[in-house]
Image (cartoon, rainbow, N blue to C red):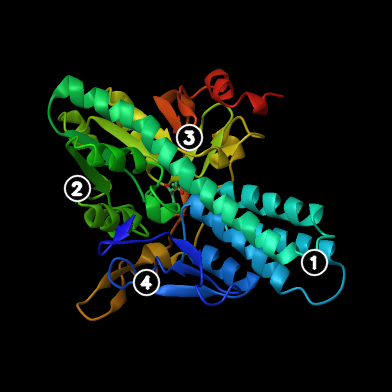
Amino acid sequence: MKIGGKHYHTIWLKEDDQQIVQVIDQRKLPFQFEIYDMKTVEDAYFVIREMVVRGAPLIGVTAAYGMYLALLGFSEGDLEHYLKSKADYLKSSRPTAVNLAFAVDEMFDFIINNLGSPELIQLTLNKAHELKQQEIEFGEKIGEAGLGIIEAIYQRKGETVNILTHCNAGWLACIDWGTATAPIYKAHLKGIPVHVWVDETRPRNQGARLTAYELGEEGVPHTVIPDNTGGHLMQHGMVDMVIVGSDRTTVRGDVANKIGTYLKALAAKDNAVPFYAALPSSTFDWELEDGVSEIPIEQRNAEEVSRIEGWDGTQIQSVQLIPEKSTVANFGFDVTPARLVTGLITERGVCRADKQSILQLFPEKQK
Ligand code: MRU
């Protein structure tokens, strides 16, 4: 997608140096556009942990390149043992998005299966490129699958389709297109009038800072709202559908996503507003059934809540927001039970949020 009219991905190999992987530093957006260089597996851990990059598919692809950087950094000893420890290290950077473990395991297995090859480094790099390319294709297909839902609402309504989204499940959270935003971009490109209600998404404000930014760069009409506004809008017929992303979705369709998603789903149910989660297959956890009890929920540091960042006209500033002595809770994600989810939009099409429908789309996952 575009920034300043120029096409970007969120992650790429440095043009003149195959040993450096570059990402957009999302901690600075929308105020400053900076590129961050990753040279080691420790850099990859850092960019995921500190949210230089974030969003489930991008976390996964960053970790894939992290395994490539780990291989570059190997000097002596037992390579398999070394790679296993780097894989575990990368996986420990953030616990909720399952794309991380998916990508690291894919890379680990690939490297182990090709250990004897004289081209091992190049093959490993190609494998990371392949996972990146796969996520781009997933995003585009999710867009095509979700477009039909938006189109149907537009045909029925005959005027602008209002879509509410939470956090950033846009192209910045992926490589291109996004998950929740992909159907929106497809509809916009097709000339269907859409308008997006963007939840600001405290504490990190991924909605206000990132979703608003990327929609703006693509020319999609949108309005940023405080996180508490969605229920009111739904009660007054101002939301036609909700689309969110996911960090981990269980086999029965429970959806973990940014904290606050569950409350939006409850309000949507109460107001008969369709609630969709858009996700690539790399976001399914095929081992889990009950999301509420089984999905690990990341707890992040208190400062993300007790302080707030903004632009003072010259630089990004962080200021204290609450009394110094107050304690803080900072749960990064919550789980929306499948019963509140109208459907899942995947690269293989749209299905109901239940085990039977999910496995119909992904029959190879049947046990
Ligand atoms: O903490 P973040 O910013 O990594 O959380 C991101 C989300 O919750 C997204 O909605 C999710 O990863 C889906 S991304 C397509």
How far apart, in angstroms, are the residues tagged by discs 1 and 4? 43 Å
In the rendered image, the vertical position of residue 38 relative to residue 275, given as above or below: below
Residue at the bottom extreme, as displayed: 314
Q: Can residue 263 be seen by looking at this rendering?
A: no
Q: Which residue is mark 4?
A: 324
Q: Mark 2 touching mark 3, by CB under 8 A?
A: no
Q: Earlier in the sequence, mark 3 or mark 4?
A: 4
Q: CA distance from mark 1 to mark 2?
A: 47 Å
> Which image quadrant: the N terminus?
bottom left
Q: Which residue is painted at 37% across and 66% down in the image?
A: 306
Q: Look at discs 2 and 4 and give the one toward the viewer.
A: 2
Other residues around mark 2 within 10 Å, as few (<14) / some (14–19) / many (≥20):
some
**Closer to the camera in the image, 14 or 334:** 14
Q: Residues within 10 Å of mark 1 (few under 14, many from 20)?
A: some
Disc 4 residue type (three-letter): Glu
Which of the two labelled residues, at mark 1 and mark 2, occupies the earlier sequence position?
1
Give the label, 3 or 4, closer to the camera.
3
Name the image quarter holding the C terminus. Answer: top right
**Residue wearing tag 2:** 222
User: For the residues marked 2 and 4, what is the alpha-carbon distance in whole angstroms?
Assistant: 35 Å
Q: Which residue is mark 3?
A: 347
> Which amino acid lies under the numbered mark 2 shown in the image of this protein?
His
Image x and y of residue 326, in percent: 39, 64
Image spot of residue 361 (x, y percent): 55, 24
- 72 vs 81: above or below: below
Q: Single out the mark in the foreground, 3 or 1.
A: 3
Mark 3: amino acid: Glu
Q: Which mark is residue 82?
A: 1
